[in-house]
């Protein structure tokens, strides 16, 4: 196509829509109808994108629906968290922007999977594409969420240092925060200006509550609250100087500990996710290499045992990847239950038939198993009831039973197709050696000849074996000896017998049932794993509670309820128990604190609650926690030791879990196939020696 023609085509594509626009405008004017779209276009503001109310309503409804779907709920929350870190949007805007990114990622993933399915035309390639999407999703979360979180924490630490310097100069918290925000990087500048707006608002409490909804981490929440209290009550001179400056020092120290913990966890666990998924990627070239240089091993990879080994490898690798990501998680939401909205378990449990089945499997009340399960739910911080958990376990077991039965049926179908169409190699071939194209073509021709004969056999009639021999003699007449014709007949009979045996057997259903029973106990194992990981973080959060209480106890008008509210705002692991305590606090403070100790029976946390009980009517809060400042050095060393132990435990768990798929791959794709092929070759060799 010539250059003038291209220029003319481009000009026409640009001019024609404008001409059509003015023609339609003229027609509307002739009919006496005002051109509302043209007026809206003329009155638009330059650089401001006009909002579509219907599209905005669609985004808001999609956000609410997505928050109730388990598959999308975690992804939506991560994208929302990333946007909250970048800019403190209002609630409606952050929901809209979250759904924009969610739909974009969803369309990209669907497009990638469809492209792989069309190009690859293989279930293995499609599964590999799903794994690639999973890895890309995790890598993007690490890149855009965790790194931004760490960068914001570092910027917040620098902001606090600048705020200290500015406060020493002006002695006004709001002015110091504004000046420090102007010296900060872009993200922290936005949050600093938002904090300044909260402090100078006409209704600070309402503005503070609105900021709590969009603040990306607890440090910003608590610092904003402390600054509001300083603005309301004024700064106070303590034994260590200014209360505000002392609080800033403690925040900086705690943020440094948190950054160090994140960096060390990243160092130990970051590469393990790739190691966990590497066996899936390496299984394809490893299988191709084995089939190329050890042709007989292709029989193993195409057999039922090989398919089961491949599926187990995928399952082990993906499970290891998910567990390592759980170990490496550092965002605040990792222990917070998502209990908003009506749960699908509750809706499903409302049906009489479902409730009848579930109630038969739920442990009876006042039994030891019921109390153990109830305690496990509390300690793993799960929002489920025992009945809902039992319903989940039943559905998971049924889903596993259906999936395994479907895979077994698919395996039988694949085996039948393999018997009909796979290249037929003669028994007794060498295990080692590279197969050339001539031998492969001969094997393929042998398969075509067998297939032609097999299609003429009616296996429903008796004596079809003799029919095979007669057809073989006709097909191979004059081209082979009696021995070759006999071997060919036996080979075809074996193939037909193998096809007759490819159906779902009772022991296969028994295996599917056994696996589904095992999956019935998987949710309990996951909750125990969550309880173990949650227990690793408890001491770290108790140390942060001590830091927070050491600041709050210096205020004269502080109360036990206020401290509990701040602990709930700052907490992660103990937040659900603190929320229930605050709900019951007005009915009786002492009973609410006693219930809090029962729901969160961690010894260090219980000691803090016992001090709050003493501060209810016996002594003041400052007297109850007067030793926090005295033992500050001891708690600092204890926190350091706890952090080292926590990171070491997570690193050990991560290494064990991360290298499990590699070990499984070595066994499933190298050791077991070699042993399988060796035994098959030995069996054929013994048969040949017996014939000699």
Image: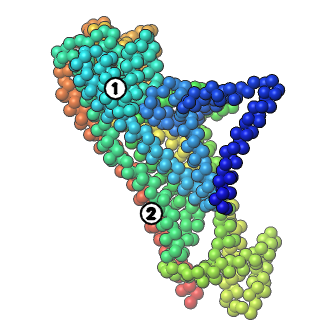
Residue wearing tag 2: 667
Question: Crowdedness of circle 2 by 10 Å Cα count: few (<14), some, many (20+)?
Answer: some
Badge 1: residue crowd in 10 Å (few <14, some 14–19, many ≥20): many
Give the alpha-carbon distance from disc 1 to disc 2, as whole Å: 57 Å
Asked which secondary structure carries label 2, the reply is: helix
Seen at 40% across and 27% down, the residue is 190
Q: Which residue is mark 1?
A: 181
Q: Position of residue 432 (x, y in %)?
A: 48, 79
Seen at 66% across and 84% down, the residue is 487
Q: Is residue 511 visible?
A: no
Nearer-the-camera pick, 360 or 228: 228
Left or right, residue 622 beside residue 384: left
Quadrant position of residue 585: top left
Q: Where is residue 226, by image quadrant?
A: top left
Q: Position of residue 255 (x, y in %)?
A: 30, 31
Quarter holding residue 394 = top right
Residue extending farthest to the top is: 617
Instruction: Look at discs 1 and 2 and give the one toward the viewer.
Output: 1
Label 1: element kind? helix
| x then y, percent, for residue 533 | 38, 38
Q: Position of residue 155 (x, y in %)?
A: 33, 33
Q: Quadrant of the C terminus?
A: bottom right
Q: Quadrant of the N terminus?
A: bottom right
Against 437, residue 205 (above or below) is: above
Residue at 61%, 50% (x, y): give it. Answer: 111
Residue at 61% over, 48% down:
110
In the depicted structure, whether residue 172 falls above or below residue 213: above
Is residue 691 positioned above or below 61 on the image?
below
| Mark 1 / mark 2, whichever is N-terminal | 1
Q: Say whether marks 1 and 2 touch (CB < 8 Å).
A: no
Along the viewing direction, whichever of 654 and 501 lies nearer the viewer: 654
């Amino acid at each position: 196509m010539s250059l003038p023609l291209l220029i003319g085509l481009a000009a026409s594509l640009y001019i024609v829509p404008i001409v059509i626009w003015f023609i339609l405008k003229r027609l509307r004017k002739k009919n006496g109808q005002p051109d509302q779209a043209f007026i809206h276009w003329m009155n638009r503001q330059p650089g401001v994108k006009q909002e579509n109310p219907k599209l905005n309503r669609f985004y808001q409804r999609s956000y609410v629906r997505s928050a109730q779907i388990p598959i999308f709920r975690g992804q939506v929350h991560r994208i929302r968290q990333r946007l909250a870190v970048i800019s403190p949007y209002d609630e409606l805007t952050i929901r809209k922007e979250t759904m924009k990114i969610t739909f974009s990622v969803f369309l990209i993933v669907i497009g990638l999977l469809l492209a792989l399915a069309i190009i690859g035309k293989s279930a293995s390639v499609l599964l590999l594409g799903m794994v690639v999407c999973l890895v890309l999703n995790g890598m993007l979360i690490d890149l855009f969420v965790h790194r931004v979180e760490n960068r914001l924490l570092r910027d917040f630490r620098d902001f606090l240092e600048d705020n200290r310097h500015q406060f020493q100069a002006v002695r006004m918290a709001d002015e110091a925060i504004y000046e420090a925000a102007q010296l900060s990087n872009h993200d922290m500048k936005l949050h600093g200006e938002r904090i300044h707006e909260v402090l100078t608002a006409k209704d600070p409490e309402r503005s503070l509550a609105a900021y709590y909804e969009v603040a990306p981490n607890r440090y910003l929440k608590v610092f904003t609250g402390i600054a509001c209290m300083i603005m309301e009550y004024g700064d106070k001179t303590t034994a260590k100087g200014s209360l505000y400056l002392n609080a800033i020092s403690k925040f900086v120290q705690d943020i440094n500990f948190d950054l160090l913990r994140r960096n060390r966890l990243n160092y130990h666990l970051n590469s393990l996710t790739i190691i966990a998924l590497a066996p899936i990627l390496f299984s394809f070239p490893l299988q191709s290499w084995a089939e190329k240089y050890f042709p007989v091993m292709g029989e193993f990879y195409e057999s039922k045992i090989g398919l089961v080994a491949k599926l187990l490898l995928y399952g082990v690798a993906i499970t290891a990847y998910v567990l390592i990501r759980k170990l490496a998680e550092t965002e605040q939401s990792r222990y917070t239950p998502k209990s908003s909205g009506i749960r699908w378990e509750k809706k499903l449990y409302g049906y009489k038939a479902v409730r009848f089945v579930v109630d038969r499997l739920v442990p009876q009340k006042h039994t030891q198993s019921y109390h153990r399960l109830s305690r496990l739910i509390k300690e793993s911080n799960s929002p489920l009831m025992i009945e809902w958990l039992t319903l989940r376990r039943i559905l998971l077991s049924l889903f596993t039973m259906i999936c395994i039965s479907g895979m077994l049926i698919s395996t039988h179908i694949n085996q039948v197709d393999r018997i009909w169409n796979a290249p037929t190699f003669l028994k007794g071939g060498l295990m080692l050696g590279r197969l050339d194209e001539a031998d492969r073509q001969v094997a393929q021709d042998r398969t075509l000849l067998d297939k032609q004969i097999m299609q003429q056999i009616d296996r429903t009639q008796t004596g079809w074996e003799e029919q095979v021999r007669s057809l073989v003699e006709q097909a191979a007449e004059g081209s082979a000896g009696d021995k070759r014709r006999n071997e060919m007949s036996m080979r075809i009979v074996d193939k037909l017998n193998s096809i007759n045996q490819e159906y779902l057997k009772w022991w296969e259903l028994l295996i599917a049932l056994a696996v589904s029973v095992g999956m019935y106990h998987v949710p309990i194992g996951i909750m125990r794993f969550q309880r173990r990981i949650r227990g690793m973080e408890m001491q770290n959060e108790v140390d942060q509670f001590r830091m927070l209480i050491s600041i709050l106890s210096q205020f004269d008008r502080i109360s036990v309820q206020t401290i509990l509210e701040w602990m709930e705002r700052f907490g992660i692991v103990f937040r659900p128990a603190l929320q229930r305590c605050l709900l019951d606090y007005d009915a009786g403070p002492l009973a609410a604190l006693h219930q809090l100790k029962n729901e969160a029976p961690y010894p260090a946390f219980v000691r803090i609650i016992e001090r709050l009980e003493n501060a209810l009517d016996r002594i003041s809060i400052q007297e109850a926690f007067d030793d926090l400042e005295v033992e500050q050095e001891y708690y600092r060393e204890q926190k350091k030791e706890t952090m080292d132990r926590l990171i070491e435990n997570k690193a050990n768990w991560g290494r064990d879990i991360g290298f499990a798929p590699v070990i499984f791959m070595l066994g499933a794709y190298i050791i077991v196939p070699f042993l399988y092929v060796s035994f098959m070759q030995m069996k054929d060799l013994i048969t040949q020696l017996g014939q000699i």
